[in-house]
């Protein structure tokens, strides 16, 4: 192509298609070298076999040091004026040390990386390291739908507040009541965690810290007295379903967490050491429940179910019992205890932990010893003390059991 040839729209219109027999898909014309082109170095026109014409800027990347190219549009959609403007802008970026293609590709990723996509592709694979990741999925899909589409780089505190306001104005399909503040806080906490991950991994704006969790005063204080515990264990051991009754008795004697005891297998019991091993707890650690003679007797009284590995075998094949809320309600009724959902002093399955902690404290057991018995890492004072010996742990675990078993 002669350098005396002027670059005009007519010139581009008259370019013939690439030969059908040509080895290459396109042939290339150096538009920058044409007379009065007004284009920076590196602008090319590629003409295909079908006659289509597209513009390209070839350059050496200031970032990678390698040869690169970026599309500038097609003819005739991109006129010469626009071609000159865009190519000059890209060339200026190169002079400033910016790779225009890398910059553009990053912007495309930014725009397509929505909150939903970030949650599924980035946050969730990391979250699956914790046992409660399915709860995160349920909360995100149920309560955060209205902002799923928001690009992760455009997420604002207002979006998070929007989710909060939506939940405060809705009624739970499960309870038929407005969402509890604690439930809303769990969703807000999830969004805060997602935003912090995006900030750390993708340099997204950190905005969630501007939104505070709702103030909640829902600390449960209900627990059984020594006499009530004796009556409770007696009723539990006489409950019609032996597995469920034994479970409730041991739950309130050990102070274990519901799932951590309910999902125990017969193979978790060390009869010789008189202990139950819990391989994974809420704290992310293992834990051992040391058994008194009374507890061992309760375990031995539980009938084993063929082909069901669980101590507290349920009616479903190879499954444990369901949460024993109905049985707890029946026993409370027999004891004359009120059942007031939402009341701080209402006796729930979690009250087993308060009961054990409170009664052991009344027996003079130090707080840090109680924390070890309950595997309660949140008690700050427990961190200042060394681990208990097995003998000391066994002694503490037996105290409460001895109090109750005196009536048997």
Image: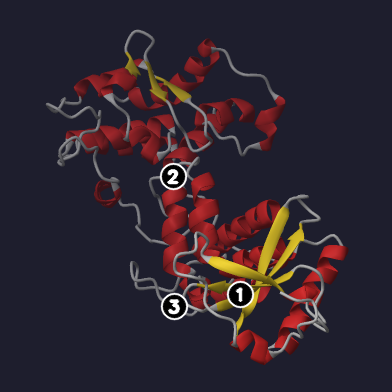
Point out residue 144 in the picture as x, y percentages from the top left corner. Answer: 49, 69
x 62%, y 30%: residue: 367
Compared with 239, 31 (above or below) is below
x 70%, y 58%: residue: 68
The residue singled out by tag 2 in the image is: 351
Q: Residues within 10 Å of mark 1 (few under 14, many from 20)?
A: some
x 37%, y 27%: residue: 404
Q: Quadrant of residue 352?
A: top left
x 77%, y 82%: residue: 84
Compared with 178, 231 (above or below) is above
The tag earlier along the polypeptide, 1 or 2, is 1
Image-based side of 281 in relation to 189, left or right: left
**Residue situated furthest top in the rendering:** 272
Compared with 394, 126 (above or below) is below
Q: Report the colour scheme.
A: secondary structure
Image-based side of 76 in relation to 132, left or right: right
Point out residue 332 in the picture as x, y percentages from the top left corner. Answer: 30, 49
Q: Check the picture and name the quadrant holding the C terminus.
A: top left
Image-based side of 383 in relation to 130, left or right: right
The residue singled out by tag 1 in the image is: 159
Q: CA distance from mark 1 to mark 2?
A: 37 Å
Of the two numbered discs 1 and 3 in the rendering, the one whose residue sits closer to the viewer: 1
Q: Residues within 10 Å of mark 2 (few under 14, many from 20)?
A: many
Which secondary structure, mark 3? loop
Point out residue 28 in the picture as x, y percentages from the top left corner. Answer: 63, 69
Q: Nearer the viewer, residue 263 or 258?
A: 263
The residue singled out by tag 3 in the image is: 170
């Amino acid at each position: 192509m002669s350098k005396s040839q002027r670059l005009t729209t007519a010139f581009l219109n008259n370019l013939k298609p690439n030969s059908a027999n040509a080895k290459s898909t396109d042939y290339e014309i150096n538009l920058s070298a044409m007379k009065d082109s007004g284009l920076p170095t590196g602008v090319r026109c590629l003409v295909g076999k079908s006659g289509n014409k597209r513009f390209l800027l070839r350059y050496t990347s200031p970032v990678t040091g390698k040869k690169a190219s970026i599309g500038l549009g097609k003819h005739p959609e991109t006129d010469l004026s626009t071609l000159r403007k865009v190519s000059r802008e890209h060339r200026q970026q190169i002079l400033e040390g910016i790779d225009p293609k890398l910059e553009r590709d990053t912007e495309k990723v930014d725009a397509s990386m929505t909150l939903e996509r970030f949650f599924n592709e980035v946050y969730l694979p990391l979250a699956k390291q914790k046992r409660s990741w399915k709860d995160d999925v349920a909360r995100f899909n149920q309560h955060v739908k209205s902002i799923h589409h928001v690009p992760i780089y455009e997420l604002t505190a207002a979006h998070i507040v929007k989710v909060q306001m939506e939940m405060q104005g809705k009624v739970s399909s499960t309870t038929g009541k407005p969402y509890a503040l604690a439930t809303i806080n769990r969703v807000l906490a999830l969004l805060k965690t997602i935003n912090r991950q995006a900030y750390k991994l993708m340099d997204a704006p950190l905005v969630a810290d501007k939104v505070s969790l709702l103030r909640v005063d829902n600390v449960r204080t209900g627990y059984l007295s020594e006499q009530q515990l004796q009556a409770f264990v007696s009723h539990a051991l006489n409950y019609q379903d032996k597995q469920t009754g034994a479970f409730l008795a041991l739950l309130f004697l050990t102070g274990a967490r519901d799932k951590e005891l309910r999902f125990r297998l017969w193979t978790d019991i060390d009869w010789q050491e008189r202990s139950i091993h819990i391989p994974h707890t809420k704290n992310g650690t293992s834990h051992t429940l040391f058994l008194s003679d009374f507890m061992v007797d309760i375990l031995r009284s539980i009938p084993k179910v063929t082909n069901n590995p669980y101590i507290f075998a349920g009616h479903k094949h190879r499954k444990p019992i369901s949460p024993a809320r109905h049985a707890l309600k029946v026993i409370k009724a027999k004891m004359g205890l009120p059942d007031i959902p939402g009341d701080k002093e209402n006796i729930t399955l979690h009250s087993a932990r308060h009961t054990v902690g409170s009664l052991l404290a009344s027996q003079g057991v130090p707080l840090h010893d109680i924390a070890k018995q309950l595997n309660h890492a949140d008690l700050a004072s427990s961190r200042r003390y060394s681990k208990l010996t097995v003998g000391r742990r066994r002694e503490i675990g037996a105290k409460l059991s001895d109090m109750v078993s005196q009536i048997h």
